[in-house]
Amino acid sequence: MFKIRTMNKIAAAGLEALLNNGCEVGEEIADPEGLLLRSADLHETELPESLLAIARAGAGYNNIPVEKCTEKGIVVFNAPGANAQAVKEQEIASLVLASRDILGSIAWVRSVEGEGERIPELVEKKKAEFAGPELLGKTLGVIGLGAVGALVANAGVDLNMRVLGYDPFLSVDAAWRLSRKVIHTENLEELYQSCDYISVNVPYTESTRSMLNRDAFARMKQGVRIINESRAEVVDDADMTEALRSGKVAKYVTDFPNETILKAPNVIAMPHLGACTPESEDRCAEMAANEMYDYLLNGNIRNSVNLPDIYMNRLGECRLCVIHRNVPRMITRILDFISAKNINVEHMINKHRGEYAVTIVDLGEKIDGTTADLILEMEEVLRVRVL
């Protein structure tokens, strides 16, 4: 069937999804049609000519050269939402850790080992130093209301917090997932000024780079507590350090430690643990594998990061899939080649995403390779597949 090269250790659920469909899967596969990976960095990797798809068993995809892949007609998939439950649970823990010095208290208790009968007395004298505010009644701001952000916002409601959510690209599906008690704000200014806690759950892009910076901190409440389960780069580390030292930010909980932020006070840093549960790894791997297999077999695209979602049931004897630039008359020109062969079109669909588009055409009979080659010769066409 299809040849899939794994670039990382992949959870068994993902491997089984491919092996059960007859795929050849392994680390040393030559001329693969698909790559399945987690954190492997592909920016310096030579992509084989045989490659049709890359599937990331996780949500982030900054380890993949997306633009390069698009120009080669390679579909890049991710697994949004598959790790959302795991990340949400860690964010709930982070809210508590940001409020009370639980980690400091545990370390202190370990330090009094050997004090024997004095330990209860020492505990009573010391405990006030680790106290902190309750979450009840506080205001939580959630920036980014995607798969993770929506769950975090709902969890805040369940904790009896007042929750403000901000997402200028809020999808209909995400809106349905949100509790009606979440207040949707259309500007960050309101969120910054109102919130005691801020949770960041946005993808890392040029527009989100260093979005939490000196200017943003200046607009926040004194003593705000910030949780970053997004990416390190969405926070300006130097400005965050300054805000922590001044007390503007009371606590910063991040899943993305680095040398700069580890030197700052009042930082709780974890080693990118958000999605590190066996259940999450299984869901991510299985989701990524199934997306890639459906594309390789049927040309359907779901959860692509570089091309539009496009899918339909097979209705003809043959399916033609064309990845092309989104320019006028492309559909007409593709259909002209098919009409020249007197082949009936059973069904077709076209979707675009920015400057790129995908057209799927189901045909009443098989099309020869010559027609596909003629379509591929068009300057605007990036990939042609006959299935």
Image (cartoon, rainbow, N blue to C red):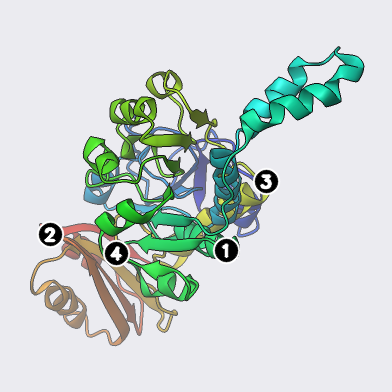
Instruction: For marks 2 and 1, give the CA distance.
Output: 54 Å
The residue that label 2 is drawn on is 380
In primary-sequence order, the first of circles 3 and 1 is 1
In primary-sequence order, the first of circles 3 and 4 is 4
Q: Give the foreground label among 2 and 3.
A: 3
- Quarter where residue 345 is shown: bottom left
- Quarter where residue 115 is shown: top right
Instruction: For marks 2 and 4, give the CA distance.
Output: 29 Å
Q: Residue at x 45, y 76 (%)?
A: 176
Q: Are marks 3 and 1 in contact (CB under 8 Å)?
A: no
The residue that label 3 is drawn on is 278
In primary-sequence order, the first of circles 2 and 4 is 4
Instruction: For marks 3 and 4, give the CA distance.
Output: 31 Å
The residue that label 1 is drawn on is 160
Q: What residue type is labelled 2?
A: Glu
Q: Do the residues labelled 4 and 1 touch (CB within 8 Å)?
A: no
The residue that label 4 is drawn on is 169
Q: How crowded is mark 2: few (under 14 residues within 10 Å), some or many (20 or more)?
A: some
Of helix, strand and loop, which one carries label 3? Answer: helix
Q: Which amino acid does label 3 sit on?
A: Pro
Q: Quadrant of the C terminus?
A: bottom left
Q: Which residue is drawn at 67% across and 46% down?
A: 278
Of helix, strand and loop, which one carries label 2? Answer: loop
Closer to the camera in the image, 104 or 318 = 104
- Quarter where residue 241 is shown: top left
